[in-house]
Image (cartoon, coloured by chain):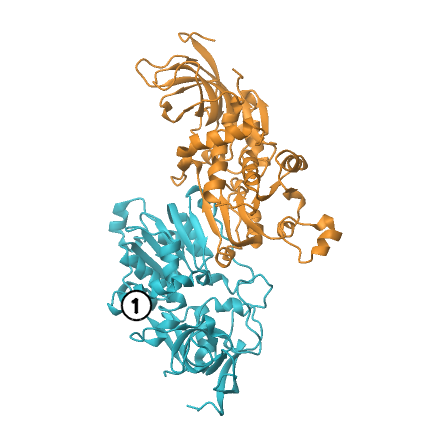
Chain colours: A cyan, B orange
Amino acid sequence: MANGNEEVENKQIVLRDYVSGFPKETDMVPSKTTLKLKVPEGSKAVVLKNLYLSCDPYMRSRMNKSDGSSYIHSFTPGSPLVGYGVSKVVDSGHPDFKNGDYVWGMTGWEDYSLIENPDSLIKIKYTDVPLSYYTGILGMAGVTAYVGFYEICSPKKGEYVFISAASGAVGQLVGQFAKLLGCYVVGSAGSKEKVDLLKNKFGFDEAFNYKEEPDLNAALKRHVSYLYNIYFDGLKKYFPEGIDIYFENVGGKMLDAVLLNMRNHGRIAACGMISQYNLEKPEGVHNLLLVVTKRIRMQGFLVFDYYHMYPKFLEFTRQHILENKIVYVEDVAEGLESAPAALVGLFAGRNVGKQVVVVARE
Amino acid sequence: MANGNEEVENKQIVLRDYVSGFPKETDMVPSKTTLKLKVPEGSKAVVLKNLYLSCDPYMRSRMNKSDGSSYIHSFTPGSPLVGYGVSKVVDSGHPDFKNGDYVWGMTGWEDYSLIENPDSLIKIKYTDVPLSYYTGILGMAGVTAYVGFYEICSPKKGEYVFISAASGAVGQLVGQFAKLLGCYVVGSAGSKEKVDLLKNKFGFDEAFNYKEEPDLNAALKRHVSYLYNIYFDGLKKYFPEGIDIYFENVGGKMLDAVLLNMRNHGRIAACGMISQYNLEKPEGVHNLLLVVTKRIRMQGFLVFDYYHMYPKFLEFTRQHILENKIVYVEDVAEGLESAPAALVGLFAGRNVGKQVVVVARE
């Protein structure tokens, strides 16, 4: 490693320009610059060596030209993308961080990042789990699943829980939390491989490939006749009693089908709507009158409002990981140069499990 | 009045057949039968003389042929409609009710009704307000406004409140509750007369005629420039700071426009969606992603779940009526034969204030 006095080469992934519609790999371009691995004299900055980068659906909205209405700033064309990552401190002017510390938080899509204000970085306390986990299950996606399920869904033992985009970083964890509580859990995903993961690895009661269901309503809904289910098992569907809790990650047609199958007093935690992010005009949702007649509570949330719960979440989730009561699947892309394809792949559903990019392993 | 031993003529309004699309007056037909004004020996029934009948939007769903999914039973074609009303007990086999008592609750659209199970009727305790009020402000619509605002909206002093169908039975009361709490209140309605009522009678801060707003989003939203508002007062719009609370009575396009103008952590009480009740396929709502990014809580409710709060509501609201701190506007149709037109008029927005039908005054 450089000793800090000389400048080192710093590979970057730069946003070419604002994006409309589906993002393409070529919207992001590899670039090179140099960086001195030393913080400016007297500053509170840190210099990070980036190890793992997280690809998250919310990043799509940062590629839009801001109209001032978004909850989050747009990326700057010509500059590296920014996102959650796990990094090692290589120089620090901040009293909370010293050389060699591992941290997670917002960093650049580049080999090294100078973080002017590191206050929001979180120092990694436990290294008895893979460091990459702090880009997902022990980072932003994990807290999202935790607060979304326990705080927003008001779950009770025995309830019927449906999760869309269920093999993703958030969905796989929500499903496991729900199983720990004694719920019946069904997930939807977009390939046979993901469906198998949900059933065989994450312990969901059922899972289905939404691309193979021409009628999502029929897939979810109960049949009136019990015998019909027994004799025509191929037609047995997933919520014979209806859905108490829907953990919403996709929006659009799936939400419409779910509304038809919600139970009275059901809850919908609106975490994201990935099917809508790249559309010029979002799909219409037609069945909202059922929110009234079924007394449904639909509640949106953003993890940023809940980071005060991180320590409690961390103890709970790490313990379950160490005891093998919660498992985790990552889709690992090797090398910074693979990051654009990895991010674009999210929106085509190419990732199987949490999408991570390895910049360096140490 | 008959002495009970003879049969009296009983005029009725009968549902001709299940309805699809907009209901027409001719979907309901006047009819005649006879009734003995005496309860069957040994029964717990009561015989009611009906005085005032309530026309309510939810009644539309009872005109549909049931597919088993509705929260409420369909009417029976060939039988009188059923709805909330104020009645006088003319004979009773039930220990809670005696001749001459006034009650409100579910009764038939007819001169006299035999109620086999009167357990859900509520005996009217206070007659120092007009009896017709128990079809609205002191009945189902009143409790709806009370629980919808105080229980579902989590309102705070100074918040920005928007109410659609605001001059209706529920809306006019929600607006006054919000003003009592110190909120800024804007209502929408469908005529100049209703808008004037909202501003001049009910004390709303602002009101507008949605039919005269080609762009609902522009009507609601803030202008960036304050000077622009001052110099072009005709263009001044209603929520320069956005909406904290939306009391939803109409659905469809209005909901889409409201979502664009909600503030972070806003709340939507979904009470009804009258613009959608007569459509074969409900309109699509496109802006639900904002539920996530603005952390909106949208909650449906039905008053039937909250009748345990009736006594508390009644004391509160009656006191405010007696002190003239809450006012109330009824649209009174005279005679049972006017009931079909009155009910149909709800869906064209013809009523100004709460729609009541007078069957008899005593």
Q: Which of B11 and A308 is in front in this view?
A: A308
In the rendered image, which quarter contains the N terminus of chain A? bottom left
**What element does badge 1 sit on?**
helix
Query: What amino acid type is highlighted by mark number 1?
Result: Arg
Taking the spot 39% from the left edge, 41% from the top edge, the residue there is B69
| Whether residue B358 is situated above or below residue A228 in the rendered picture | above
| Left or right of residue A161: residue B351 | right
Q: Which of A165 and A110 is in front in this view?
A: A110
| Whether residue B324 is situated above or below residue A258 in the rendered picture | above
Taking the spot 32% from the left edge, 70% from the top edge, the residue there is A329
Q: Nearer the viewer, residue A7 or B217?
A: A7
Q: Can residue A163 be seen in this view?
A: no
Measured from the top left, where is residue A198 in percent x and y? 31, 64
Count how many numbered circles sit on residues in the image: 1
Q: How crowded is mark 1: few (under 14 residues within 10 Å), some or many (20 or more)?
A: some
Q: Can residue A187 be seen in this view?
A: yes
| Whether residue B17 is situated above or below residue A260 in the rendered picture | above
Query: Where on the picture, by quarter, is residue A348?
Result: bottom left
Measured from the top left, where is residue B70 in percent x and y? 41, 39
| Whether residue A125 is situated above or below residue B92 in the rendered picture | below
Q: Name the residue under label 1.
A: A318
Return the chain for callout 1. Answer: A
* Residue furthest to the right: B231
Query: Where on the picture, by quarter, is residue B309?
Result: top left
Measured from the top left, where is residue A303 in percent x and y? 43, 62
Measured from the top left, where is residue B119 in percent x and y? 36, 25
In the rendered image, which quarter contains the C terminus of chain A? bottom left
